[in-house]
Amino acid sequence: MIRNLIKKDFKKNKIITLTLFVFILLSSMLVSSSLTIVTELNGSLNNLFEKSKVPSYVQMYSGDISQAKIDKFTKKNDLVKHQQTVEMLGISGENLFLQGNNESEVNSIIENSFVKQNPSFDFLLDTNNKVAKIADGKIGIPVYHQQKYNLKLGSKVKVKLGDYEKTFVISAFIRDSQMNPSLVTSKRILLSSHDWAQMKKKIQTPEYLVEFELKNEADISKFEKQYQKSKLPQSGTALTRTLYTVLNSMTDGIIVAIITLISLLLILIAALCLRFSILTSIEEDYREIGIMKAIGISNKNTKKIYMVKYTVLSATACLVGFLSSILITSQFTKSMTDYMGTTPKTAISYLLPFVGSLVVFGLVYLFCKTVFRRFKKISAYNALQASETTSNRKIARRMSLTKKKGFLFGPNVFIGIRDVLTKIKTYLLLTVIYSICVFLMSVPLSFLQTVQSPSFISYMGAGKSDLRIDAHQVDKNKAEFQKLQTELKQNSDVKNLVVYSTSSYQIKNSDGELVTTKIESTNDYQTYPLKYVTGSAPKTANEIALSSMNADEFGAGVGDKLTVYNQGKKQKLKVSGIYQDVTNGGKTAKAKLSSKDVLWYTFNFNLKDPSKTDEFKTKLTKEFKHIKVTNTDEYIHQTLGGIIQQVSNISVVSFVLAVFIAILITFMFFKMTIAKETKDIAIMKSIGISNKTVRVQYLTRSVMVSIFGIVLGILLTNLLGPKVATLLISGVSNLTFTNNFVLTYLLIPLLLIIVATISTWIVSSTIKKIKVMTITE
Amino acid sequence: MILKVSNLSKSFPIENMEPQQVLKNIDLTIDNGEFVSIMGASGSGKSTLLYTISGMTQPTSGTVEFAGENLSNLSEEELTNLRLGKIGFVFQQANLLKNFSLIDNVTLSAYLGKKESKLKIDQRAKQLMKQAGVSEIATKDITQASGGQLQRVSICRALINQPEIIFGDEPTGALNSNSAADIMKLFNEVNQTGKTILLVTHDAKIASQTERILYMSDGEIIAERYLGKMTDSSQLKEREEKVAEWLKVLEF
């Protein structure tokens, strides 16, 4: 009997049932997919870290190094399991020809270094996650380059350094647990020990990674403090396993966050559709429900009859959703698979997504049960006497046709508007759907535009300027840097030059311990401002601004005072602001201090003619050998390229999904509304009102509701969009959207109104089929 | 002559069975200004005849000519225009739109027909409702009126566009005797203004107030009785007796 009931209901309400099915299916599929991605990301990352034996703590350093001192420190330290110092032979872009031809990497911001395979940990892996072995004449290229240039095994890579010129054949693509992500601008290229030794003869100034593998990963922060207290190299960036985890998961994490957000919105849409569908069927069957009550069938049993349909529908949709998630997840995890590899599937890799689908089913089931509580309110007498009317009588009276002096857009449009206003509750579903659609269309696009905008860099710890110069190893290149500063000051093409100097200081943390911290100083934080999470840049010499990671480390908030030791002198500085930083390992600070021992300088400046940026950069790079010049636009493009691509893909999917949702729900909504109002339509036809006139009334309702929804959606996007985007790129707070006015306020609304109009016009064609004789049925 | 029906048949298809013929080769003419009623037992086809000749549904064969025009040749749009301007219909149930006040129900089709100014339409609606004795509840909702009042409003709605003919399908069928009498009084007044009226009823009392009675059985008009116009309510009893006697003969 129940099978027949469901069959009959499906035949009667095909579109509605299919719409509900699709939304529950999509919700279940996306929840399952995001859980699959999380499981796979976790598995892949752990596998990569395990196979490569990722270091617990790494100090980057360029300059003279004493391995004996490091060995002495290691020997004394109980926390360390292994130590190794990796020697990296940095090569300038103009000397490297990754595509085998004559096109060098001169315009790339990537800093490439040649290494040989490490002996005890921090292994560079091949695409089978095995320790890569490179023969003489062969080369291992990072996956990043493989993806960027679509390189193949057997392709050639040329290195040209003065009189040294050698062509290598690619024999492996390298997964590097430290430098995999596009956010990390350094990349390691693997050579055989022999080739590496040959190249070392040509590159005199290697960079070092002083790496430590700890016995227990939980001791990283304890070790970090011990290292900072030692006299070992400190002037470069220090990195920890935690940061590697964050960097490696960032791109996929954003995908997970966006998919989760979309699936939550879909669950909301499914719930709203269910509510509408249930209330409509209650309204349609009002008399039948009354009869059931009158003949003594309990509420519980009546509810059961109705619940069967929704239980079967949602259970099937959730199951299909789960199964389809298995098929589609590979689309989302391609980049993860390329960069980190996969792990064999375990029971948990299926169980967790299945539980996700089960939760969606549970939510839908509970929601339906809640809506069906309405049965209690229906009295047998009322149900048998009259049909339920859902309109607001007060508004209906106020908007009486005869009370109006005239109709601005004609009586038909007035009737359409009146219908929406008297049945606001009913139209709420469509209004909310349209606002969700605006949200789904605008937020990823605005987010994309914000991330693509050159000023986005100011959310990540660097001020926005046309060019930025990093000048390290000050002690060795003092004369060169002074010359650089003088030249920049005198150059008429340069404007707004600001020089930042970074020195090492000691700050007392909340436990009273002294922590070595690099503080950047300048007198001008206004020309190239950063976006602060809270507070602002230091304005006086008694203030300090901290990066989020350092604020956490010191347990300090805005207004707190920190004790800073500057060359033995104690100074109390008030925290003026906290900012997000991905540069220099994320642990930075800004103040207006002065120190004789400058570790590095940073120069930010604009050009009078910004079109000359590349030309100016090349000129500087040629003239000054020990500096790194970065074009900010290029930097954004190359570091955030991966994320921008992912967000861009998601924007397209989200945009299409929103249009699909708008079409489907408009169809479903008006199909049900027309079915519910069949008798009223037949009455109108009987008194000579044409099909076209009735259809225009429905069109008016649809356009009006879509406009309401769009306005609400734009408000929501502006209010919540930046907050949602902030959640997606955790830590970057107070994000202000770079909105595309034409897109957000014109094109998206226009598109949605067109979607509403066309969908309603098509679905309202069924009005033609309604016979006047329906009145007598 | 406003209506001419020739050789009209209507069948309804039944799944896996022969179609059921409800109307069989009916010929009928109605003159301008006539007040005609159709009687017959349940299932005799009287309502189907009414809906077919009023253009609400198409005949299987035969023709219906309304003011010289064959309804079968009219498009859906032309039929709609006919219903808007020339035909008024009153159902057994008032069938008013729930979301509108009583007066809005009356004026709606006129507003949407856009043939007259709003002022004129409003004036006529008020006048009609006054004549029907429902002007005091004009702005009320349909839930605030009795069955008889609703039916009177539906007659006003049928009259708003000044149609040439009014069709009524058991318009007093769901009403008590007092309300039914009021409705018939109203129909008589309307007929006196020159409008043609064609009613379906199973009530002899109602039929006796009309000018001519057609009697249907098994899809055919088997008898016809001309009573002439009722000019005074004092004639009612005598007319009722005549009809009762006529029916007695027919039904045995």
Image: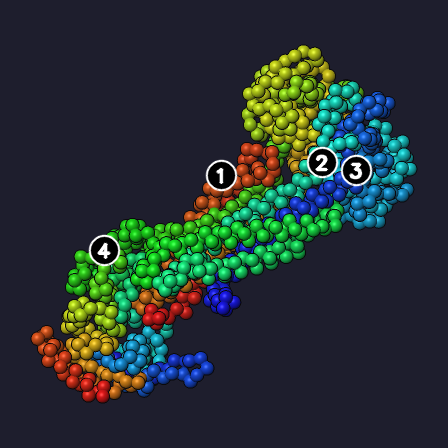
Q: Is residue A576 above or below residue A303?
A: above
- The quarter of the picture where residue A452 lies is top right
Q: Amino acid at mark 4?
A: Thr
Q: Amino acid at mark 1?
A: Leu
Identify the residue position indicated by label 2 in the image: A244
Instruction: Calculate the distance from the C-alpha at mark 3 to the C-alpha at mark 1.
Output: 44 Å
- Residue A525 visible in the picture: no
- Residue A568 visible in the picture: yes
Identify the residue position indicated by label 4 in the image: B139
State the residue at coordinates (27%, 52%).
A397
State the residue at coordinates (19%, 88%).
B249
Q: Secondary structure at mark 1?
A: helix
Q: Amino acid at mark 2?
A: Tyr
Identify the residue position indicated by label 3 in the image: A53
Both marks 3 and 4 on one chain: no
The chain containing the residue under callout 4 comes to B
Whole-percent x, y for residue B153 in the image: 23, 63
Q: Secondary structure at mark 2?
A: helix
Both marks 2 and 1 on one chain: yes
